[in-house]
Image: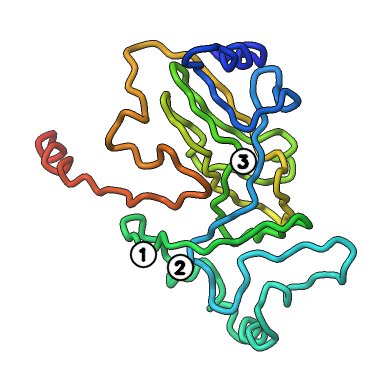
Amino acid sequence: MQLTGPEILRRMQEKQNPDIIIEPFDVRCLGSNSYDLHLADTLRVYKHTIPNGMKPAIEYKRGTKELTMRDWFDSDFDYKKFLYSPNAFDIRNPKFVIDPTNPKHHETVDIKIPSSGLILSPDVGYLGSTIEYTETRNLFPYIDGKSSVGRNFILNHHTAGRGDDGFCGEWTLEIRVLYPTVVYPYMRIGQIYYEEFSGERMPYNKNPKSHYNGQRGPTAAAVIPVDHFLKEATQKQK
């Protein structure tokens, strides 16, 4: 059962051990059954996925010269290299492969979003984070995009919109855009919802295997384990 906006507020105002903490909080961001979350001013991209000589994003300055493909490149020389050999800059090129088990592939570079805005590329995946720090107890939290965000074809998560009972931290966002799209610090980027659940609790912040509890800012992926112990169990089923 999903909590309404007034119920979210009531649970935040409990004097001892509130089920919900949202910081900073402003009642103007409280909806009928959710709370609006906002984009912080730092993005991270995996170093390994950015072609040499190419910018992962472009500062947006409204009213300046018309932007062209040249603006994605660090120099005229790099742009000419792209024109001569576009394959070297194509993210479908296997040289940009991400191996989820390789920590070196999760090394990141930071990009600051200026107040004037930042143009994101459809060819790049960005790790962002919410301004809001949240704590959740006795409830199942999850985030999703706002309808206006979706109608600008901005994705704010890739399967990782579900949280856990006991999660404490800022939310990392996995951002993709369909077109070159401007984002701004403090823009509304999504909503958080809360649902009740049944059963014995297993809080995320008490689980020693939890990777992301207490995270601040965009957090790169933990190494994804390959569970070889399942191989024997699978063979026994055959």
Residue 172, given in percent of the width and then of the height, sits at: 52, 43
For label 3, the residue is 131
Q: Residues within 10 Å of mark 2 (few under 14, many from 20)?
A: some
**Numbered circle sitting on residue 12:** none
Measured in 3D between alpha carbons, the distance from the residue under mark 3 to the one under mark 2, in whole angstroms, is 26 Å
Assess whether mark 1 and mark 2 are in contact (beta carbons under 8 angstroms): yes
Name the side, left or right, on which 132 lies relative to 113.
Answer: left
What residue lies at 33% left-to-right and 52% top-to-bottom?
223
**Tag 2: residue type?**
His
**Tag 1: residue type?**
Lys
Q: Is residue 123 above or below residue 76?
A: above
Which picture quadrant has residue 87? bottom right
Discs 3/2, front: 3
For label 1, the residue is 104
**Tag 3: residue type?**
Ile
Residue 114, given in percent of the width and then of the height, sits at: 72, 58
Residue 21, given in percent of the width and then of the height, sits at: 54, 24
For label 2, the residue is 48
Measured in 3D between alpha carbons, the distance from the residue under mark 2 to the one under mark 1, in whole angstroms, is 8 Å
Measured in 3D between alpha carbons, the distance from the residue under mark 3 to the one under mark 1, in whole angstroms, is 27 Å
